[in-house]
Amino acid sequence: MLEKNKKEIEWYDNPNFIVTLLLGLNIAVIILSQAFAIKNNLSSLEIFRSILNHNSAYIMLLVYFIFLETKVGKKYFNFLNIILIIFYALVTIASLLTVFQSFGLSSLVYLILYLVIFIYLVDTFMRDTRLWKDLDLDKLPFDEVTNDWYFYAIILLSVIYLAVDLISASSFDGVVLSTLGTICIMLFARYIYLYKVYQESKAKKEVKKK
């Protein structure tokens, strides 16, 4: 019985469970945000802008994880990751522009948060692609930052951003969406963390074989 319990892993160390949670939460955020928009009598154009501006990250992650559940997604895993990295690069650039347009604690934390996520994605998923060597990314000091540091930095920044968001929230709808959005970011960070753990474990096995 004890041996069986040792083999069991916690839910936060189970990548399949994390992906399932992310799929459900991203769908929930997209549906709830549009339901709140309709309830607040927003026009069709405003609802469409809301989808592009506020839900683009959730839609992107939803499509990404849906594809990962298919044979095509598993076959072109690295290609999907490159698309995801490009998307987060664009989000980071947009966040930088937002800081210049309306500087504040919220926009600054948001920029730092997405910059860390972008770097974390490059450090983790680009290693398995040809671009890692082609762009000489191995010369950058990625190895100076540990997997744990990336993960806990994103968790801390997410909590700070949520706190700032909740302080400025003017409605219960905003509180719900901010909370769910923060949980999505944390779970996504955990997904990247677990994949990097797998990478590091694989690298150690290859070194031992040599």
Image: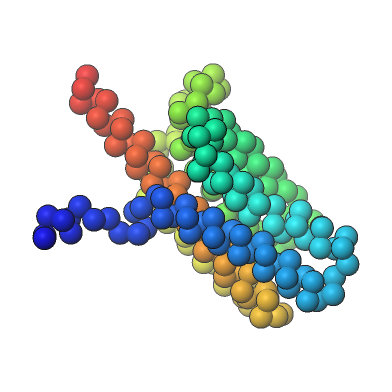
Quadrant of the image containing the C terminus: top left
Q: Is residue 35 above or below residue 21?
A: below
**Residue sitting farthest toward the front:** 71
Which residue sits at x=20%, y=26%? Answer: 208
Residue 173 seen: yes
Quadrant of the image containing the N terminus: bottom left
**Percent position of residue 185, x then y:** 54, 57
Q: Nearer the viewer, residue 52 or 4?
A: 4
Which residue sits at x=57%, y=67%? Answer: 180
Colour setting:
rainbow
Left or right: where does residue 88 sit relative to residue 116?
A: right
Tally of numbered discs: 0
**Percent position of residue 161, x then y:** 58, 65
Q: Nearer the viewer, residue 57 or 32?
A: 32
**Percent position of residue 148, x then y:** 37, 50
Which residue sits at x=39%, y=41%? Answer: 196
Left or right: where does residue 59 sit relative to residue 154?
A: right
Which residue sits at x=69%, y=42%? Answer: 90
Residue 77 seen: no
**Percent position of residue 207, x then y:** 25, 25
